[in-house]
Amino acid sequence: MPKTGPLTPCFILICAWGLLFATAAQGQLAGSAKSRFVFKDADGRTDSAEVVTKYAPRKIVRPFSKMDGSVDPKLRQAASIAEERAHAHSREQCWHYVKQALLASGAVSSYPTSVYAKDAAKELVSNYGFKKLSVRDPYKAPVGSVLVYNAKNGAGHVEIRTKGGFASDFRSKIPSPRPLIGIYTKG
């Protein structure tokens, strides 16, 4: 049997520990490499992004709208009609689609004549018996109410509050970012 000196067991122990730590470090390095996606951007530079491994759904911040019994049932029907006819993306004909939904439901007796969406508020109040609500939050508007928005350089925007969001020529879960003129309804 070969003789070993007093340094040999210490040397073996040190090598074993070094190998163990090197394996652990390599495992961490490999684990972190898997959590990043490496790609080249439009300029040809290499970049990376974290890989999402767990899905965490966001809570609903704005709940569905509630039915208000004081709102004219024809307006709730207009909301349904607008939602059915709405497209996925805007066709830049919001006031045209809202007019058609209001007329089809019987909420208005004749086709509104105003051209611009931002003028809808005046016409709905003066010709069709709508009233402006004190509510300023579009999410708190009752189903069937008409929301009218202003625009500095443009026609504005108009949409109807639906149970799950807002509809005009397109449907959306969020209201328009334009300045709100008012929320209008019939009782």
Image (cartoon, grey):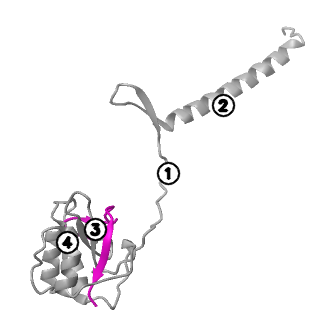
Q: Disc 4 and disc 1: Cα gap in Å? A: 48 Å
Q: Disc 2 and disc 3: Cα gap in Å? A: 61 Å
Considering only order in the chain, which callout, 1 or 4, is on the residue closer to the N terminus? 1
Considering only order in the chain, which callout, 1 or 2, is on the residue closer to the N terminus? 2
Residue 119's tag is: 4
Q: Are marks 4 and 3 in contact (CB under 8 Å)?
A: no
42 or 70: which is nearer to us? Answer: 70
Considering only order in the chain, which callout, 2 or 4, is on the residue closer to the N terminus? 2
Q: Disc 4 and disc 3: Cα gap in Å? A: 9 Å
Instruction: Find residue 169 and report its image quarter.
Output: bottom left
Residue receiving disc 2: 24
Residue receiving disc 1: 54
Classify mark 1: helix, strand or loop.
Answer: loop
Q: Position of residue 97 (x, y in %)?
A: 15, 71
Q: The disc labelled 4 sits on which kind of residue?
A: Asp
Q: The disc labelled 2 sits on which kind of residue?
A: Ala
Q: Are marks 4 and 2 in contact (CB under 8 Å)?
A: no
Residues rendered magenta in the picture = 167-187
Residue receiving disc 3: 149
